[in-house]
Amino acid sequence: MFERGERQGELLRLYYEDTFRNEGNKVVTLRQVENGYQFVSNQMAE
């Protein structure tokens, strides 16, 4: 489950706690494209 999200232009960042690998807080970044979203990254949240 995502804890929060933010949008900056065409980028969407979704924050969540990694309970699968138990690695703490992470953020997945998606780019809005014509027919949906493109995956950009999945990394540790600052």
Image (cartoon, grey):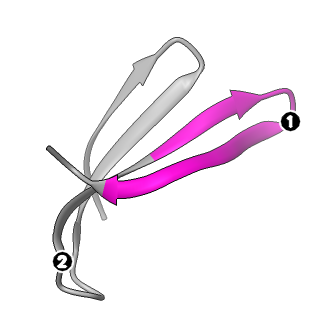
Q: Quadrant of residue 10?
A: top right
Q: Is residue 34 left or right of residue 39?
A: right
Using a 10 Å C-alpha cutoff, classify the residue at mark 2 as few (fewer than 14 neighbours), some (14 to 19) or many (20 or more). few
Residue 33, magenta (yes or no) = yes
Q: Which disc, if any, is residue 23?
A: 2
Q: Nearer the viewer, residue 34 or 23?
A: 23
The image shows residue 13 at horizontal and vertical percentages of 40, 37
Most distant residue in the right direction: 35
Q: Amino acid at mark 1?
A: Asn
Q: Vertical placement of 28 versus 18: above or below?
A: above
**x 35%, y 57%: residue:** 43
Q: Amino acid at mark 2?
A: Glu
Residue 2, magenta (yes or no) = no
For the residue labelled by badge 2, is the local secondary structure a helix, a strand or a loop? Answer: loop
The residue that mark 1 highlights is 35
Most distant residue in the top direction: 9
**x 53%, y 11%: residue:** 9
User: Disc 1 and disc 2: Cα gap in Å?
Assistant: 32 Å
The image shows residue 38 at horizontal and vertical percentages of 71, 44
Magenta span of residues: 29-43
Viewer-nearest of labels 1 and 2?
Answer: 2
